[in-house]
Amino acid sequence: MRADQELIPVPPQETLVAVGVFDGVHLGHSGLIKQLTTLAHSRNMLSCIVTFSNHPRTVVTPGFEVKYITDPKHRVKLLKDAGADLVMPITFDHNLSLLSADQFVDLLQDKLRMKGMVMGQDFAMGHNREGDVEKLKTMGLAKGFSVHVIEAACHNGENISSTIIRNSIADGMLTRAIDLLGRPFSIEGRVVSGDSQGKTLGFPTANLDVETHLLVPPDGIYATLVKTGNKQYYAASYIGTKPTFNGSRHVIETFLIDFNEDLYGSFITIEFIERIREDKSFESSTALIEQMKIDVEYTLDILKLYTQKN
């Protein structure tokens, strides 16, 4: 077991543990953490989340790729904010994939003082997912740990899952993603230099450098909130290749409304509230400017309504 952070000392108390990827840290995950922590504290234990920084299928299924809703560092923060006492991010590698469920449990007991596990009904761990709920219950009787199975979280009669949320974002269904995440989908990155076309058009933008393993919504214009430091701004954000100018490079850039400071080199977070329209080519820069003015006004209406409700 290789931790992706500094070596965590042996916990001062016994722990109740949940294991998984927890990508997105959605409402289902938050519900599990709440139950995990409540149960742990009632037994004078600490709640502990073991999160795989990478999806196990990227190791055990050749050719499998996934775009992550949250990067590992952001995920750790969200898990702690959701109430977990301890968060252990680990890399799922080939050696870990070969461990039996029994060996994995031994690691949890040895390294984390694990005295119980909380999981969903379809949870499984160990080589070839051999350690399903029933096997873990039997193992728990022999090894002295408890197993607690919780019901899957639902929204409008549909189970909440990272896959459903990932597909919603990929389809540009941001409102649905917000409902299932319990917060807006966001992208964080460093502001880098661009081609200054936005400034020339009268809409100077901050160009974002984003990790390639992260999920990005489809091309188009979005009503967004941009956070930099402790401040938040209304913004219209663009994803695409700038077809009006025969662009080929895929960019993510954002126009912060009523903002004129230099963000170059800063880390910012873009929260996606609603997709306004698809990307398209315009006959001229004048036509594009007129549409951008409309986009900004529509963005303001959407964001004012959203912030009033939230």
Image (cartoon, helix red, strand yellow):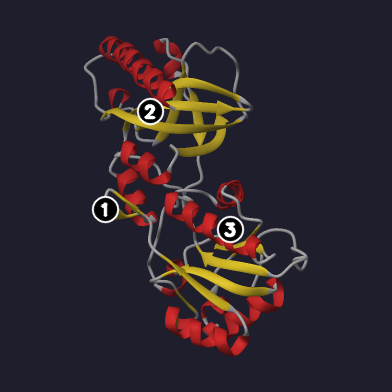
**In the drawing, what numbered circle is on residue 157?**
1
The answer to whether residue 19 is above or below residue 169 is below
Looking at marks 1 and 3 on the same chain, the residue that comes earlier in the sequence is marked by: 3
Residue closer to the observer: 149 or 231: 149
Task: Please name the residue shown 49% across and 58% down the image.
Answer: 32
**In the drawing, what numbered circle is on residue 238?**
2
Name the side, left or right, on which 269 lies relative to 175: right
Looking at marks 1 and 2 on the same chain, the residue that comes earlier in the sequence is marked by: 1
Task: Please name the residue shown 40% across and 61% down the image.
Answer: 65
Mark 1 touches mark 2? (CB < 8 Å): no
Mark 3 touches mark 2? (CB < 8 Å): no
Q: Position of residue 173 (x, y in %)?
A: 29, 39
Amino acid of disc 1: Gly
Amino acid of disc 2: Tyr
Q: Position of residue 212 (x, y in %)?
A: 47, 48
Amino acid of disc 3: Thr
Residue beneath disc 3 = 38
* Residue 159 visible in the snapshot: yes
Badge 1: residue crowd in 10 Å (few <14, some 14–19, many ≥20): few
Name the side, left or right, on which 35 lies relative to 278: right
3D distance between C-alphas at marks 1 and 2: 33 Å
